Amino acid sequence: MERVSKIIANSGYCSRRKAEEYIKEGKVEVNGKKINVGDKASKDDNIKVNGTYLNKEEKEYILLYKPRGVVSTTNDDKGRKTVLDLINTDNRLYPVGRLDYDTTGIILLTNDGNLANLLMHPKSEIDKMYIVKVKGIVPPVILKKLCNGVIIDGVKTSKAKARVKRYDKKSDTSIVELTIHEGKNHQVKNMFKALNYNVLKLKRETYSFLDLSGLKSGEYRHLTPKEVKKLYNEVNKSSTSK
Ligand code: URA
């Protein structure tokens, strides 16, 4: 059983606060009866908001290898291609977090608002590993700074893991593997910028225990029920241990 306002918000119909307003205004019914804020229901109950039943759509979980030149929002005011344009589904899916237009790599999409919110919650501390191509040499002192936290807009980033994978003398570029669990806007680019490095290329290789194995850029696959369960375990582990 869950609060009806939460079920409504997770369905993507509106925010939780708005759902509470609708409940107060008597615009929400559960199995034909008006309810009060704080009342609970199960996913099998019939919930009606403003005269329409909430969709009891099947939960869908997708792992996409996002190519460059695609936005990771559900629509774009500049009319650019979105991650949803790459997926064939009748469900209303949402990306879990964001990757920049020019960033490639792993991104999850789902209509399970509950899991998406838990994964994106800072408390969950989901590890994400990025492969970063930067101009110049990245010496140990810089790696140490990346690991211990750099200041962005007056706030220090959390502990991270960083190592240089290789340096190419000819092009004077380094490939750095950086693992962070925070997900602030442009975080990786801003971390390097704060240390006077310009990110030339950025790819997210892993998201928690998931990676891009078997996928080419632009391809996607559904998560297995086992993987979904494991993601739920990851977020539940964080909420009980931290
Ligand atoms: N950090 C960035 O700077 N960009 C991304 O797309 C993801 C993480």
Image (cartoon, rainbow, N blue to C red):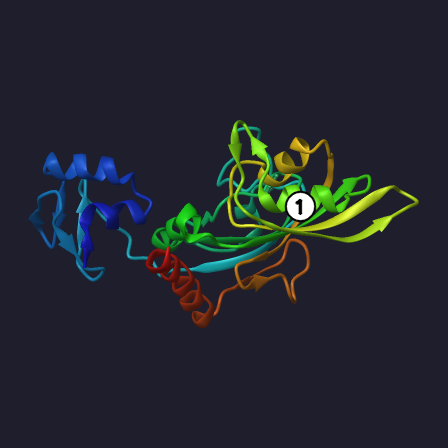
Residue extending farthest to the bottom is 226
Residue 184 place in picture, x, y as percent: 51, 38
Q: Is 97 in front, or is 195? A: 195
Q: Residue at x 57, y 32 (%)?
A: 151
Q: Which residue was labeled with disc 1?
A: 144
Q: Residues within 10 Å of mark 1 (few under 14, many from 20)?
A: some
Ligand 1 within 8 angstroms of badge 1 C-beta: no
Residue 15 located left or right of residue 70: left
Q: Report the quarter where the C terminus lies.
A: bottom left
Q: Secondary structure at mark 1?
A: helix
Q: Amino acid at mark 1?
A: Lys
Q: Is 79 in front, or is 151? A: 151
Q: Residue at x 12, y 47 (%)?
A: 29
Residue 8 located left or right of residue 205: left
Residue 167 place in picture, x, y as percent: 83, 49
Residue extending farthest to the right is 170
Above or below: residue 44 compared with residue 84: below
Residue 154 located left or right of residue 177: left
Q: Is 120 in front, or is 240? A: 240
Image quarter of residue 1: bottom left
Above or below: residue 30 compared with residue 28: below
Residue 179 place in picture, x, y as percent: 60, 52
Q: Residue at x 33, y 45 (%)?
A: 12
- State the count of labels: 1
Residue 213 place in picture, x, y as percent: 64, 66
Tell which quarter ligand 1 is in: top right
Q: Residue at x 71, y 41 (%)?
A: 142
Residue extending farthest to the left is 33
